[in-house]
Structure formats: C-alpha cells, structure tokens
Image (cartoon, grey):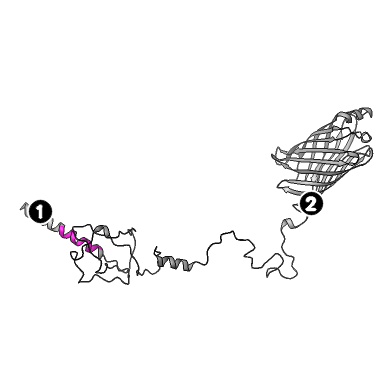
Amino acid sequence: MRLQYVNKALALAIAGLAIAPVWAQSMDMPGMSMPGMGSPAASASSPADHPVSPTKAPAMSGDMGGMNMQGMDATTPSSSKAIPTPSSKPAAAPNDMNGMDMPGMQMQGTGAATQAAADGNMKGAAPNQPRSADAYSGGYTLTTGPFIPPGVKPPRLADQENFGSVLVDRLERAYTRDGNWSAYDVQAWFGRDFNRLVIKAEGDVSQGRLQDARTELLWGHAVAAFWDTQLGVRHDNGSGPDRNWLAFGVQGLAPYWFDVEATGYLGNAGRSALRLATSYDLLITQRVVLQPRVEANLYGKDDPARQIGSGLSDATAGLRLRYEFTRQFAPYVGVEWSGKFGRSADYARIAGEKTRQTAIVAGLHFWF
C-alpha cells in the first residue's frame, strides 16, 4: 500500500515538472497587447522534437514583480522557439519586447535601431567651447531692440554712472596747556568704480592763522577689490614758503579692516617725502566706535624754511571715541599725542616750541 502511494506521488511530481514550463510561457496577462506574438499553436512541436540546452536560453534581466499589467495579453513564443524538456532546467522568458504595444509607456532599448532613433531626435551636439553670453541675444543691446522705446533712456549699470562722496574724517578742536588749535582732515572723490578724481586736504589753524596745510589732487584707479593707486599733485602752504610735489601712492583696506594710506612725493630741488597713515574702527556696539589712528611723515632732505628735517620728521597717534547717531553723523572725543624728531625737533627748539605734546580733542565725523 505504501509503495502504491509513493508511486502516485512521484507520478504527480513528474507531471507537475512537465506542465510548469508550458504554464509559465502561456501565462495570461489580461489587457496586454503584444502584436506579432500569437497564442500558442495547437500544433506546436513537442519538447522532444526540439531539445534545447538550458545554457542557450537567454535569461530575463528585468524583474517585473509588482508590475500592474491590466489590459495586457501575453503570448508564448512561436513554435520555432524550443521548450525545454522536463529533465532540463526551464529557460526563462527572453528579454525581447520588440513589437509590444504599451500605450502611454515609452520603452528604450539598446539595439542599433533604438540608438539611431535617439540620434535622430537630438537637436544638435553640445558645443566644445563655452557659449558666449552675447551669442544668443538676437542682436539686442543696451541701446537697441524692441524693449528700448524711442525717447527712453536705456538702462545702465552702476559702474557706468558717476558718483561722488565727501568724508570729513576729523573736524575738531584740540586743547593743550600751551594753547588750542583747530584741525581738519577731509577727503572727497568723484567718478566711477575704476577711475575717480580724489581730493585730500589736511591742516591746522591756530590764532586765526593757517599754520600748516596739505592739499592733494589725485587720480585714483582701482587695481584690486579694496585697493586704489593714486597719482597727482600736492601743494603745501601755511607758515613758510609754499611747496609743490608730484604725488604717487596707494590707498585701501588691508586685511583685518585696517584703512591704509602710503604716498610718496617728489619736489623741486631734489626734495622727496613719504607719508604713512593707518586707522582702525573698533565697534564696541553698533553705535559706539573706538578709532585708533597713526600718521608719520618722512623727508629726504632738510628744509629749514619750513622747519623740516631729513628722516622721520613728525608723527601723531590718537584715540577717538565716537557715537554714531547715524552712519553719516557722529560726534567724538579723544586724545592725541604728537611729536617731532631729528632735525625737525631741533628747529622747533630753536623757535621756542615744544617737541612733544598731548592734546584733548573733540569734534565731528560725518560724510555725505
């Protein structure tokens, strides 16, 4: 009895193995239309007529698990395709989907025909060189084109316009034990981002008389993001004879936000000079600013008529605390130390003047 049951079970297993490949090839996918692939013919050759080695059968590379194919009919391959025998491994369905009609789905292949179609759809190959911004303007410019009506000023960029500004860095009154005086330090410019006219003026007034004054007229040219070169003339007046100089130098913002000026001068009779100045704005709050400032003047030769000696002639160092009611207007108070050195100190002693002094200053800082 047991042997009979075992024989029946073996027979059912062999029958299942024989039917499984045929069932997989003839799987029904409702609604899927595959023109060129008919239903399996009744006269299809038996597996024994056309045996196929499992290694010759192409494997399906795509995983179609979870794919909704409602309304698609699938058919088995034509009779020319061999069906493996039950004793061999079942061949997977080939990955050939030519002739399959899938409305709304665009499928891309890797064959030569697919590549040719893709090449035909290309509008043109990408250029080897980067395109020019003006190549696609259609002939439009800042002054022509349908967007520039007659009589309307064409648009202009910021660096095409002229601007101007006046900075009164120091307009102050200084107080010492030996006397008081007023001082000014003004800088103005007019022009564009790269080229501009620059005017600098600095001087002292005491007892109603101009004691010392320096005025410069310069052409500034931007050479870097925060630096300008300057070329022009300088005129000195006040006590003693006037002096004229050819000026050349740089001005800009050094790393860590230091304002720097370095200017060289050449005058008549072989005179030469160098002026160095730097300042820094330390923001204690958004309105309270502490500004240290240092300035030094050096000369190449003695000028007794103006009490100037060669080498380091004079230097000043100040500390000013200002309160900015607005960014454009700020009163301040501070202290400034000044001194004369070398031959300049000797000329001051001969004239009965002090070579070192400390002053309390108060004034205004503003610009417009």
Q: Is residue 262 visible?
A: yes
Q: In the depicted view, which residue is nearer to us: 87 or 50?
A: 50
Circle 1 SS class:
helix
Picture layout, residue 258 above or below residue 46? above
Q: In the depicted view, which residue is nearer to us: 57 or 176?
A: 57
Q: Position of residue 128 (x, y in %)?
A: 56, 59
- In terms of image quadrants, where is residue 27? bottom left
Q: Is residue 368 visible?
A: no
Q: Position of residue 136 (x, y in %)?
A: 62, 65
* Left or right of 242 on screen, residue 285: left
Circle 2 SS class:
strand
**Numbered mark located on residue 196 in the image:** 2
**Which label's residue is closer to the chain start, 2 or 1?**
1
**Is residue 67 found inside the magenta-colored segment of the image?**
no
Q: In the depicted view, which residue is nearer to us: 313 or 349?
A: 313
Residue range (magenta): 14-24
Q: Which residue is mark 1?
A: 6
Q: Residue furthest left?
A: 1
Q: In the depicted view, which residue is nearer to us: 349 or 5?
A: 349
User: Type of residue at label 1?
Assistant: Val
Q: In the image, what residue occupies the spot 79% across and 51% down? A: 196
* Left or right of 242 on screen, residue 362: left
Gap in angstroms between the C-alphas marked 2 and 1: 107 Å
Q: Dot 2, crowdedness within 10 Å: few (<14), some or many (≥20)?
A: many
Picture layout, residue 11 above or below residue 216? below
Q: In the image, what residue occupies the spot 25% across and 64% down? A: 25
From the image, give the main secondary structure of the stretch colored magenta. Answer: helix
User: Type of residue at label 2?
Assistant: Arg
